[in-house]
Image (cartoon, rainbow, N blue to C red):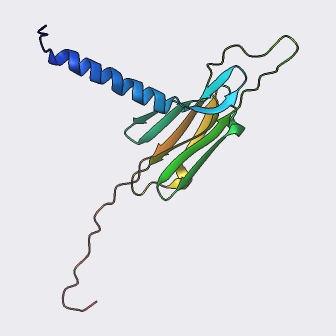
Amino acid sequence: MTIVRWEPARELTSLQSEMNRLFSSFFDAPSSPAPGGALRRWVPAMDLIEHEDGFTLTADLPGLDAGDVTIEVEDRVLTVKGERTVSYETGENGGALRIERSSGAFARSLTLPEGVDADAVGASFEKGVLTVTIPKPEERKPRRVEIAVGDRP
Protein backbone atom coordinates (compact mmCIF):
# COMPACT_ATOMS: atom_id res chain seq x y z
CA MET A 1 0.00 0.00 0.00
CA THR A 2 1.31 3.44 -0.98
CA ILE A 3 0.38 6.52 1.00
CA VAL A 4 0.15 9.73 -1.00
CA ARG A 5 0.13 13.04 0.78
CA TRP A 6 -2.95 15.12 -0.05
CA GLU A 7 -2.09 18.57 -1.38
CA PRO A 8 -5.10 20.88 -1.74
CA ALA A 9 -3.18 23.23 -4.06
CA ARG A 10 -2.61 20.41 -6.55
CA GLU A 11 -6.32 19.57 -6.51
CA LEU A 12 -7.24 23.22 -7.16
CA THR A 13 -4.74 23.42 -10.01
CA SER A 14 -6.25 20.34 -11.58
CA LEU A 15 -9.76 21.77 -11.19
CA GLN A 16 -8.66 25.10 -12.68
CA SER A 17 -7.10 23.34 -15.67
CA GLU A 18 -10.30 21.43 -16.34
CA MET A 19 -12.43 24.59 -16.04
CA ASN A 20 -10.10 26.44 -18.44
CA ARG A 21 -10.36 23.56 -20.92
CA LEU A 22 -14.16 23.56 -20.63
CA PHE A 23 -14.47 27.32 -21.21
CA SER A 24 -11.94 27.26 -24.06
CA SER A 25 -13.82 24.51 -25.85
CA PHE A 26 -17.12 26.37 -25.38
CA PHE A 27 -16.01 29.86 -26.44
CA ASP A 28 -13.69 28.71 -29.22
CA ALA A 29 -16.34 26.54 -30.84
CA PRO A 30 -16.21 26.53 -34.62
CA SER A 31 -18.67 28.93 -36.23
CA SER A 32 -18.52 27.54 -39.74
CA PRO A 33 -16.43 25.07 -41.65
CA ALA A 34 -13.71 26.28 -43.99
CA PRO A 35 -11.07 24.70 -46.18
CA GLY A 36 -8.29 23.29 -44.07
CA GLY A 37 -10.20 23.35 -40.79
CA ALA A 38 -12.84 25.20 -38.86
CA LEU A 39 -12.99 28.88 -38.01
CA ARG A 40 -13.29 30.12 -34.47
CA ARG A 41 -16.17 32.30 -33.34
CA TRP A 42 -15.14 35.94 -33.53
CA VAL A 43 -15.77 38.15 -30.51
CA PRO A 44 -14.01 41.50 -31.00
CA ALA A 45 -12.26 43.00 -27.99
CA MET A 46 -13.90 46.11 -26.53
CA ASP A 47 -12.94 48.61 -23.85
CA LEU A 48 -15.41 50.86 -22.02
CA ILE A 49 -13.84 53.84 -20.29
CA GLU A 50 -15.70 56.31 -18.06
CA HIS A 51 -14.78 60.00 -18.21
CA GLU A 52 -16.11 62.99 -16.32
CA ASP A 53 -18.55 63.92 -19.09
CA GLY A 54 -19.26 60.53 -20.67
CA PHE A 55 -18.12 57.10 -21.73
CA THR A 56 -15.89 55.93 -24.57
CA LEU A 57 -16.33 52.50 -26.11
CA THR A 58 -13.37 51.34 -28.20
CA ALA A 59 -13.50 48.16 -30.30
CA ASP A 60 -10.76 46.51 -32.34
CA LEU A 61 -12.28 45.53 -35.69
CA PRO A 62 -9.33 44.63 -37.93
CA GLY A 63 -10.14 44.03 -41.56
CA LEU A 64 -13.48 45.87 -41.41
CA ASP A 65 -14.58 49.18 -42.89
CA ALA A 66 -17.07 51.59 -41.33
CA GLY A 67 -19.75 50.23 -43.70
CA ASP A 68 -19.32 46.72 -42.25
CA VAL A 69 -20.41 47.85 -38.77
CA THR A 70 -23.84 48.87 -37.43
CA ILE A 71 -24.45 50.71 -34.15
CA GLU A 72 -27.96 50.80 -32.69
CA VAL A 73 -29.38 52.31 -29.49
CA GLU A 74 -32.75 50.98 -28.38
CA ASP A 75 -34.30 51.05 -24.91
CA ARG A 76 -30.99 52.02 -23.21
CA VAL A 77 -29.12 49.16 -24.96
CA LEU A 78 -26.26 50.04 -27.31
CA THR A 79 -25.48 47.24 -29.78
CA VAL A 80 -22.48 47.03 -32.11
CA LYS A 81 -22.95 44.50 -34.94
CA GLY A 82 -20.89 43.49 -37.91
CA GLU A 83 -19.37 40.67 -39.86
CA ARG A 84 -15.87 39.86 -40.97
CA THR A 85 -15.61 37.50 -43.90
CA VAL A 86 -12.52 35.68 -45.05
CA SER A 87 -12.39 33.84 -48.34
CA TYR A 88 -9.83 31.29 -49.41
CA GLU A 89 -9.23 30.25 -52.97
CA THR A 90 -8.57 26.65 -53.79
CA GLY A 91 -6.71 25.95 -56.98
CA GLU A 92 -4.82 23.19 -58.64
CA ASN A 93 -2.04 23.40 -56.05
CA GLY A 94 -4.32 23.11 -53.03
CA GLY A 95 -5.88 25.56 -50.63
CA ALA A 96 -5.55 26.75 -47.06
CA LEU A 97 -3.33 24.58 -44.91
CA ARG A 98 -3.95 26.30 -41.60
CA ILE A 99 -6.67 28.76 -40.58
CA GLU A 100 -6.33 30.61 -37.29
CA ARG A 101 -7.93 33.99 -37.99
CA SER A 102 -11.45 34.23 -36.67
CA SER A 103 -14.30 35.49 -38.81
CA GLY A 104 -18.07 35.62 -38.90
CA ALA A 105 -20.87 37.78 -37.58
CA PHE A 106 -20.72 39.35 -34.15
CA ALA A 107 -22.97 41.44 -31.90
CA ARG A 108 -21.92 43.07 -28.65
CA SER A 109 -24.41 44.90 -26.42
CA LEU A 110 -24.21 46.99 -23.28
CA THR A 111 -26.81 48.73 -21.16
CA LEU A 112 -26.53 52.51 -20.99
CA PRO A 113 -27.30 54.57 -17.87
CA GLU A 114 -30.81 55.92 -17.43
CA GLY A 115 -31.34 59.21 -19.24
CA VAL A 116 -28.68 58.88 -21.98
CA ASP A 117 -29.75 60.76 -25.11
CA ALA A 118 -29.50 58.25 -27.98
CA ASP A 119 -29.23 61.11 -30.50
CA ALA A 120 -26.08 62.38 -28.76
CA VAL A 121 -24.17 59.09 -29.17
CA GLY A 122 -21.42 59.49 -31.78
CA ALA A 123 -18.99 57.14 -33.51
CA SER A 124 -15.82 57.25 -35.57
CA PHE A 125 -13.81 54.56 -37.34
CA GLU A 126 -10.10 54.78 -38.10
CA LYS A 127 -7.50 52.13 -38.93
CA GLY A 128 -9.74 49.25 -37.85
CA VAL A 129 -10.64 50.82 -34.48
CA LEU A 130 -14.23 51.84 -33.73
CA THR A 131 -14.68 54.60 -31.14
CA VAL A 132 -18.17 55.30 -29.77
CA THR A 133 -18.70 58.33 -27.54
CA ILE A 134 -21.60 58.25 -25.13
CA PRO A 135 -22.34 61.45 -23.17
CA LYS A 136 -23.44 61.07 -19.58
CA PRO A 137 -27.00 62.12 -18.85
CA GLU A 138 -27.42 65.48 -17.20
CA GLU A 139 -28.10 65.20 -13.51
CA ARG A 140 -31.61 66.02 -12.56
CA LYS A 141 -31.59 69.06 -10.36
CA PRO A 142 -34.27 69.64 -7.77
CA ARG A 143 -36.83 72.19 -8.84
CA ARG A 144 -37.68 74.83 -6.29
CA VAL A 145 -41.38 75.53 -5.95
CA GLU A 146 -42.30 79.01 -4.80
CA ILE A 147 -44.90 79.22 -2.08
CA ALA A 148 -47.58 81.83 -2.62
CA VAL A 149 -48.55 83.77 0.47
CA GLY A 150 -52.15 84.80 0.96
CA ASP A 151 -53.54 83.95 -2.45
CA ARG A 152 -54.23 80.46 -3.65
CA PRO A 153 -52.49 79.41 -6.83
Q: Is residue 42 above or below residue 89?
A: below
- Residue at the (19%, 91%) spot, across then down: 150
Q: Find residue 3 and report its image quarter.
A: top left
Image position of 141 (left or right of 76): left
Between 3 and 95, the one lying in front of the other is 3
Q: Is residue 98 above or below residue 126?
A: above
**Spot occupied by residue 1 in the image (x, y as percentages of width and height):** 12, 8
Residue for point 46% across, 55% down: 76
Q: Is residue 29 left or right of residue 67?
A: left
* Horizontal relation, residue 128 to residue 115: left or right: right
Spot occupied by residue 4 in the image (x, y as percentages of width and height): 14, 10
- Give 104 or 49, whichever is nearer the viewer: 104
Q: Quadrant of residue 114?
A: bottom left
Locate residue 80: give its quadrant.
top right
Q: Give the residue furthest to the top.
A: 2
Return the x and y of residue 6 as percentages of the image width and height: 13, 15
Asked if one can make out residue 62 in the rendered structure from this viewpoint, the answer is no
Residue 21 image point, x, y percent: 40, 24
Q: Quadrant of the C terminus?
A: bottom left
Relative to the observer, which residue lies in front, 131 or 45? 45
The reply to whether residue 37 is in sight is yes
Q: Is residue 93 left or right of residue 18?
A: right
In this rendering, the count of numbered labels is 0
Q: Residue at x 70, y 27 (%)?
A: 34
Q: What residue is at 66 percent from the left and 37 percent from the top?
A: 83
Residue furthest out toward the right: 92
Q: Is residue 58 above or below residue 140?
A: above
